[in-house]
Amino acid sequence: MKITIKLVGAFRVGRFKEEVREYPPSTCVREVVEDLRISNFLLGSVLINDVHAGGDSMLHDGDRLCLLPFMDGG
Amino acid sequence: MCSMGELSNYIRDLAEGGLLAWPLQIAASERFGVSVADVERVALEQGILPARYQRNRNTVSVSQQLILHRSTVAVIGCGGLGGNVIEALARLGIGSLLVIDQDVFEEHNLNRQILSSPATLGRPKVEEAVRHVGRINPAVNVIPYHLAFSSSNGPGLLASCDLAIDALDDISTRLALAESCAEVGIPLIHGAIAGWYGQVTTILPGDDPLNTVFNVHGGGKGLELQLGNPSFTPVVVAGLQVAEACKLLLNVGAPLHGRALLVDLLGMDFDAIAWGER
């Protein structure tokens, strides 16, 4: 299945801003995060099709996945 | 002692072109034994703008300036974001600022925190906020709280506020702030920064804050520990937060509700993404 992945902020460094990637059916968000070698500790928010989702949320063909880093500074 | 009617007449007689110059605001304050904030209020109530706000005028009308003067905004955190937020709110003309921070200035704050200087090292950040605002706009009432914000003291602190601005640097206090704002029914303008990056969003009463910000994060430290913060990122994000505060107080424009503005200063990319609840 094809998933459009959008990375935000520091996640883009050494990766990409937006890319369409192929994954097998029943892939969940956490597996994509691992595939991209993003630390779970630095993951702040996940959006699937502009709606908040979790690490265990299942992806479907054509989904648009957005991964936001955990920004805590002030 | 004076009657407000006498003060009103005095201000009206002195104003030129609808503006009250600062020396005359001081003179009115001394002559009638009232604060410069009282003079500002009486002037605005009769459509006269303190001259310090004249460049606001085509963006913020005189009647809107009175709304800002009557507003109370809480700033939680007086560091990188908070210092810039406090400066901009004071120059905008917010009447009362509640500033909350338990910290004192340390040397590693000097690269970005505008309330800090070598002379202020070791001093409470909230005390410097009071001094700084007193220098730039004495008509603003600053109420300092040198304490740690928590879910137990939060609702009491925020009860008199129209909105709160998140300028914190850790997730557990941010969530306590969001819960407190929900409890007292006021908007919360969230901002966070790390390195070249930042984010801003507005959480309104009735939203689920846990489902809005950091919805998958389990706690601990985030990107700031790795990336630090340079001088320019807090300026940008604080400016966005204050613009959002101004809009919410005046009920104008399109707030960042249900969406987040993501700032990437390395790529010079500003992206407002939809940000819906599950």
Image (cartoon, rainbow, N blue to C red):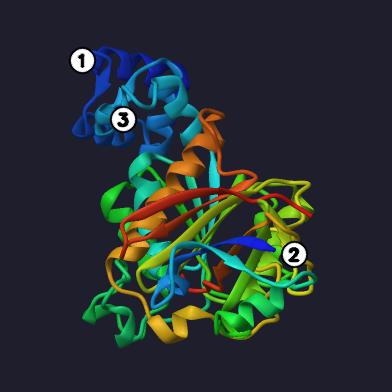
In this rendering, position of residue B108 left or right of residue B78: left
- Please report contact status of discs 2 and 1: CB closer than 8 Å, yes or no: no
Q: Residue at x 50, y 43 (%)?
A: B245
Q: Label 3: chain? A: B
Q: Quadrant of the N terminus of chain B?
A: top left
Q: Chain of mark 2?
A: A
Look at mark 3 in the image and give the residue it sits on.
B56
Please state the horizontal and vertical placement of residue B150, each as a whole percent of the image: 69, 72
Q: What is the quadrant of the C terminus of chain B in the image?
A: bottom right
Residue at the spot of label 2 = A59
The answer, for residue A32, to whether it is visible in the render is: yes
Q: Position of residue B243 (x, y in %)?
A: 43, 42
Q: Closest to the observer: B218 or B114?
A: B218
Residue B70 visible somewhere in the drawing:
no
Disc 1: which residue: B16
Q: Tell me if mark 1 has few (under 14), some (14-19) or many (20+) residues whose alpha carbon lies within 10 angstroms of its own.
A: few
From the image, state whether disc 3 or disc 1 is nearer to you: 3
Left or right: A68 with respect to B40? Answer: right
Spatial separation of the CA atoms under disc 2 and disc 1: 65 Å
Q: Residue at x 25, y 34 (%)?
A: B52
The secondary element bearing badge 2 is classed as loop
Who is closer to the viewer here, B221 or B118? Answer: B221
Report the residue at 70% width, 78% height from top: A30
Rounded to the nearest angstrom, the CA distance separating label 2 from label 3 is 49 Å
Q: Could you give the CA–CA distance between mark 3 and mark 1, rounded to whole angstroms?
A: 17 Å
Circle 3 packing at 10 Å, graded few (<14), some (14-19), many (20+), is some
Q: Is residue B58 above or below residue A8?
A: above
Amino acid type, callout 2:
Leu
The correct choice, above or below, for B145 with respect to B218 in the image is: above
